[in-house]
Image (cartoon, helix red, strand yellow):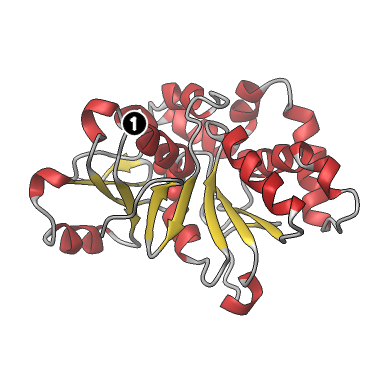
Amino acid sequence: MFFGPTVLPPAEWHGRVVVVIDVLRASTTMATALSHGARAIIPFDSADDVVTRSKSFERGDVILAGERRMRAIPGFDLGNSPLEFTREAVEGKTILLTTTNGTAALASIQGAREVIVGSFVNFSAVVTVLRTAARGDVDIALVCAGSERQFSLEDAVCAGRMLRALSRRLTSATLSDAARAAMVLERRYARDLPSLFQDASHGLRLAEAGFGDDLAACAALDAHPVVPVYADRQVTRLGTDRGR
Ligand code: MLT
Protein backbone atom coordinates (compact mmCIF):
# COMPACT_ATOMS: atom_id res chain seq x y z
CA MET A 1 0.00 0.00 0.00
CA PHE A 2 1.54 3.28 -1.11
CA PHE A 3 0.31 6.83 -0.65
CA GLY A 4 1.37 9.13 -3.44
CA PRO A 5 3.29 8.35 -6.61
CA THR A 6 6.21 6.20 -5.76
CA VAL A 7 9.47 5.51 -7.48
CA LEU A 8 10.53 2.00 -6.66
CA PRO A 9 12.95 -0.05 -8.73
CA PRO A 10 11.26 -2.61 -11.02
CA ALA A 11 12.49 -5.41 -8.75
CA GLU A 12 10.18 -4.11 -5.98
CA TRP A 13 7.11 -4.50 -8.20
CA HIS A 14 8.17 -7.81 -9.64
CA GLY A 15 5.53 -10.53 -9.23
CA ARG A 16 2.97 -8.13 -7.78
CA VAL A 17 -0.47 -7.16 -9.00
CA VAL A 18 -0.56 -3.37 -8.64
CA VAL A 19 -3.70 -1.24 -8.57
CA VAL A 20 -3.25 2.46 -9.35
CA ILE A 21 -6.01 4.56 -7.80
CA ASP A 22 -6.76 8.16 -8.77
CA VAL A 23 -10.46 8.46 -7.96
CA LEU A 24 -10.59 12.20 -8.77
CA ARG A 25 -10.45 11.84 -11.68
CA ALA A 26 -7.96 9.98 -13.89
CA SER A 27 -8.86 6.41 -12.84
CA THR A 28 -12.56 7.15 -13.13
CA THR A 29 -12.08 8.74 -16.53
CA MET A 30 -10.10 5.75 -17.84
CA ALA A 31 -12.68 3.23 -16.63
CA THR A 32 -15.49 5.33 -18.10
CA ALA A 33 -13.74 5.66 -21.47
CA LEU A 34 -13.05 1.91 -21.76
CA SER A 35 -16.56 1.06 -20.65
CA HIS A 36 -17.84 3.32 -23.43
CA GLY A 37 -15.83 1.48 -26.05
CA ALA A 38 -12.54 3.37 -26.27
CA ARG A 39 -9.96 1.13 -27.91
CA ALA A 40 -7.05 2.09 -25.67
CA ILE A 41 -5.72 4.90 -23.51
CA ILE A 42 -2.08 5.86 -23.80
CA PRO A 43 -0.81 7.90 -20.85
CA PHE A 44 1.75 10.68 -21.32
CA ASP A 45 3.70 12.98 -19.02
CA SER A 46 3.20 16.11 -21.05
CA ALA A 47 0.86 17.80 -23.51
CA ASP A 48 3.73 18.08 -25.98
CA ASP A 49 4.20 14.30 -25.89
CA VAL A 50 0.49 13.85 -26.62
CA VAL A 51 0.66 16.15 -29.64
CA THR A 52 3.80 14.46 -30.98
CA ARG A 53 2.33 10.99 -30.64
CA SER A 54 -0.97 12.02 -32.19
CA LYS A 55 0.85 12.57 -35.48
CA SER A 56 1.36 8.83 -35.85
CA PHE A 57 -2.43 8.27 -35.95
CA GLU A 58 -5.15 9.10 -38.45
CA ARG A 59 -6.80 12.18 -36.92
CA GLY A 60 -10.21 10.50 -36.80
CA ASP A 61 -8.86 7.55 -34.81
CA VAL A 62 -7.39 9.47 -31.92
CA ILE A 63 -8.53 11.77 -29.12
CA LEU A 64 -6.19 14.21 -27.42
CA ALA A 65 -7.27 14.52 -23.80
CA GLY A 66 -6.05 15.77 -20.46
CA GLU A 67 -5.93 18.51 -17.91
CA ARG A 68 -3.68 20.92 -16.14
CA ARG A 69 -5.03 22.57 -13.01
CA MET A 70 -8.19 20.54 -13.67
CA ARG A 71 -9.00 22.37 -16.93
CA ALA A 72 -8.85 20.95 -20.45
CA ILE A 73 -5.59 21.64 -22.26
CA PRO A 74 -6.06 24.27 -25.00
CA GLY A 75 -6.42 22.67 -28.42
CA PHE A 76 -7.22 19.22 -27.02
CA ASP A 77 -10.46 17.40 -27.81
CA LEU A 78 -11.39 16.54 -24.22
CA GLY A 79 -10.32 17.41 -20.69
CA ASN A 80 -10.31 14.92 -17.82
CA SER A 81 -13.96 15.01 -16.83
CA PRO A 82 -15.41 11.48 -16.96
CA LEU A 83 -18.67 13.03 -18.15
CA GLU A 84 -17.01 14.05 -21.42
CA PHE A 85 -15.99 10.48 -22.24
CA THR A 86 -19.36 9.45 -23.66
CA ARG A 87 -19.80 6.52 -26.03
CA GLU A 88 -20.43 8.99 -28.85
CA ALA A 89 -17.12 10.71 -28.15
CA VAL A 90 -14.81 7.75 -27.56
CA GLU A 91 -16.10 4.52 -29.09
CA GLY A 92 -13.40 2.88 -31.22
CA LYS A 93 -10.88 5.66 -30.52
CA THR A 94 -7.43 5.64 -28.99
CA ILE A 95 -7.16 8.27 -26.27
CA LEU A 96 -3.86 10.01 -25.68
CA LEU A 97 -4.15 11.25 -22.10
CA THR A 98 -2.05 13.43 -19.84
CA THR A 99 -3.13 14.35 -16.31
CA THR A 100 -1.29 15.94 -13.43
CA ASN A 101 -1.03 12.92 -11.13
CA GLY A 102 -2.84 9.86 -12.45
CA THR A 103 -0.97 9.24 -15.67
CA ALA A 104 2.38 9.84 -13.92
CA ALA A 105 1.48 7.35 -11.19
CA LEU A 106 0.72 4.72 -13.82
CA ALA A 107 3.94 5.32 -15.70
CA SER A 108 5.91 5.04 -12.46
CA ILE A 109 5.11 1.32 -12.10
CA GLN A 110 7.61 -0.77 -14.03
CA GLY A 111 8.10 -4.50 -13.97
CA ALA A 112 4.92 -5.58 -12.15
CA ARG A 113 3.13 -8.81 -12.94
CA GLU A 114 0.00 -6.80 -13.76
CA VAL A 115 -0.99 -3.13 -13.38
CA ILE A 116 -4.66 -2.28 -13.18
CA VAL A 117 -6.55 0.97 -12.77
CA GLY A 118 -9.00 1.16 -9.89
CA SER A 119 -11.71 3.56 -8.75
CA PHE A 120 -15.21 3.42 -7.31
CA VAL A 121 -16.86 3.14 -10.74
CA ASN A 122 -15.11 -0.18 -11.45
CA PHE A 123 -14.67 -1.25 -7.86
CA SER A 124 -16.19 -4.77 -7.89
CA ALA A 125 -14.60 -5.69 -11.23
CA VAL A 126 -11.16 -4.83 -9.84
CA VAL A 127 -11.85 -6.65 -6.57
CA THR A 128 -12.71 -9.80 -8.53
CA VAL A 129 -9.24 -9.73 -10.11
CA LEU A 130 -7.64 -9.06 -6.72
CA ARG A 131 -9.49 -11.97 -5.09
CA THR A 132 -8.11 -14.29 -7.76
CA ALA A 133 -4.62 -12.91 -7.15
CA ALA A 134 -4.97 -13.31 -3.39
CA ARG A 135 -6.20 -16.90 -3.80
CA GLY A 136 -3.03 -17.62 -5.75
CA ASP A 137 -0.89 -16.01 -3.02
CA VAL A 138 0.12 -13.26 -5.42
CA ASP A 139 1.32 -10.12 -3.65
CA ILE A 140 -0.99 -7.11 -4.13
CA ALA A 141 0.09 -3.46 -3.99
CA LEU A 142 -2.37 -0.56 -3.97
CA VAL A 143 -0.88 2.74 -5.16
CA CYS A 144 -2.83 5.89 -4.34
CA ALA A 145 -1.88 8.53 -6.90
CA GLY A 146 -2.55 11.40 -4.52
CA SER A 147 -2.65 15.02 -5.55
CA GLU A 148 0.43 17.12 -6.25
CA ARG A 149 2.52 14.55 -4.37
CA GLN A 150 0.26 14.83 -1.33
CA PHE A 151 -1.94 12.27 0.36
CA SER A 152 -5.48 12.12 -1.09
CA LEU A 153 -8.34 11.13 1.17
CA GLU A 154 -10.51 9.73 -1.64
CA ASP A 155 -7.78 7.45 -2.99
CA ALA A 156 -7.01 6.11 0.49
CA VAL A 157 -10.70 5.42 1.16
CA CYS A 158 -11.07 3.58 -2.18
CA ALA A 159 -7.98 1.51 -1.33
CA GLY A 160 -9.38 0.83 2.14
CA ARG A 161 -12.62 -0.38 0.59
CA MET A 162 -10.67 -2.77 -1.65
CA LEU A 163 -8.85 -4.10 1.39
CA ARG A 164 -12.12 -4.59 3.26
CA ALA A 165 -13.55 -6.48 0.28
CA LEU A 166 -10.48 -8.71 0.35
CA SER A 167 -10.29 -9.00 4.10
CA ARG A 168 -11.29 -12.64 4.31
CA ARG A 169 -8.32 -13.43 2.07
CA LEU A 170 -5.99 -11.13 3.99
CA THR A 171 -6.29 -12.62 7.45
CA SER A 172 -3.08 -14.54 7.12
CA ALA A 173 -1.34 -11.82 5.14
CA THR A 174 0.72 -9.02 6.58
CA LEU A 175 -1.01 -5.69 6.26
CA SER A 176 1.24 -2.65 6.27
CA ASP A 177 0.47 0.25 8.61
CA ALA A 178 -0.57 2.25 5.54
CA ALA A 179 -3.08 -0.46 4.61
CA ARG A 180 -4.46 -0.52 8.16
CA ALA A 181 -4.81 3.27 8.12
CA ALA A 182 -6.70 3.13 4.81
CA MET A 183 -9.11 0.57 6.28
CA VAL A 184 -9.77 2.79 9.31
CA LEU A 185 -10.48 5.78 7.06
CA GLU A 186 -12.73 3.72 4.85
CA ARG A 187 -14.99 2.85 7.78
CA ARG A 188 -15.62 6.56 8.31
CA TYR A 189 -16.98 7.03 4.76
CA ALA A 190 -18.29 3.56 3.90
CA ARG A 191 -21.93 4.60 3.79
CA ASP A 192 -21.48 8.11 2.49
CA LEU A 193 -19.23 8.57 -0.54
CA PRO A 194 -20.68 12.03 -1.36
CA SER A 195 -19.50 13.32 2.03
CA LEU A 196 -16.05 11.91 1.27
CA PHE A 197 -15.77 14.26 -1.69
CA GLN A 198 -17.02 17.19 0.41
CA ASP A 199 -14.19 16.58 2.87
CA ALA A 200 -11.46 15.81 0.32
CA SER A 201 -9.44 18.85 -0.72
CA HIS A 202 -9.38 17.86 -4.39
CA GLY A 203 -13.16 17.32 -4.29
CA LEU A 204 -13.56 20.87 -2.98
CA ARG A 205 -11.22 22.23 -5.64
CA LEU A 206 -13.14 20.46 -8.40
CA ALA A 207 -16.47 21.76 -7.10
CA GLU A 208 -15.11 25.31 -6.92
CA ALA A 209 -13.79 25.00 -10.47
CA GLY A 210 -17.28 24.07 -11.73
CA PHE A 211 -16.79 20.30 -11.89
CA GLY A 212 -19.29 19.46 -9.14
CA ASP A 213 -21.14 17.03 -11.42
CA ASP A 214 -17.94 15.03 -11.83
CA LEU A 215 -18.02 14.19 -8.13
CA ALA A 216 -21.30 12.30 -8.48
CA ALA A 217 -19.90 10.49 -11.52
CA CYS A 218 -16.77 9.51 -9.56
CA ALA A 219 -18.90 8.21 -6.64
CA ALA A 220 -21.09 5.99 -8.85
CA LEU A 221 -20.11 2.62 -7.42
CA ASP A 222 -19.72 -0.06 -10.12
CA ALA A 223 -21.20 2.14 -12.85
CA HIS A 224 -18.47 0.98 -15.25
CA PRO A 225 -17.59 -2.66 -14.50
CA VAL A 226 -14.38 -2.91 -16.51
CA VAL A 227 -10.83 -3.82 -15.57
CA PRO A 228 -8.38 -1.42 -17.23
CA VAL A 229 -4.97 -3.08 -17.60
CA TYR A 230 -1.77 -1.10 -18.19
CA ALA A 231 0.79 -3.00 -20.24
CA ASP A 232 3.09 -2.10 -23.13
CA ARG A 233 2.53 1.57 -22.24
CA GLN A 234 -1.18 1.53 -22.90
CA VAL A 235 -4.33 0.89 -20.92
CA THR A 236 -6.85 -1.51 -22.42
CA ARG A 237 -9.86 -3.34 -21.10
CA LEU A 238 -9.09 -6.78 -19.69
CA GLY A 239 -10.16 -9.38 -22.19
CA THR A 240 -9.77 -7.27 -25.33
CA ASP A 241 -7.10 -7.60 -27.99
CA ARG A 242 -4.30 -5.11 -27.85
CA GLY A 243 -3.76 -2.75 -30.77
CA ARG A 244 -0.67 -0.73 -31.32
C1 MLT B 1 -4.82 14.00 -11.91
O1 MLT B 1 -4.41 13.04 -12.58
O2 MLT B 1 -4.07 14.78 -11.36
C2 MLT B 1 -6.29 14.23 -11.69
O3 MLT B 1 -7.05 13.30 -12.35
C3 MLT B 1 -6.63 15.69 -11.77
C4 MLT B 1 -8.03 16.01 -12.18
O4 MLT B 1 -8.91 16.13 -11.34
O5 MLT B 1 -8.28 16.18 -13.37
Residue 75 visible? The answer is no
Q: Is residue 63 above or below residue 242?
A: above
Residue that label 1 marks = 36
Residue at 69 percent across and 38 percent down: it is: 157
Residue 73 pos. (x, y %): 24, 46
Depth check: give the residue in front, 213 or 37.
37
Residue at 22 percent across and 62 percent down: it is: 48
User: From the viewer's perspective, is 94 left or right of 3?
Assistant: left
Depth check: give the residue in front, 28 or 210.
28
Residue 221 pos. (x, y %): 58, 25
User: From the viewer's perspective, is 198 left or right of 215?
Assistant: right
Residue 220 visible? The answer is yes
Residue at 9 percent across and 52 percent down: it is: 58
Circle 1: residue type: His
**Which quadrant would the N terminus be assigned to in this image?**
bottom right
Residue 18 pos. (x, y %): 60, 58
Q: Quadrant of residue 242?
A: bottom left
Dividing the image into four equal quarters, which quarter contains ligand 1?
top left
Q: Quadrant of residue 219?
A: top right
- Dot 1, how many residues are within 10 Å of its Cα: few (below 14), some (14-19), or many (20+)? some
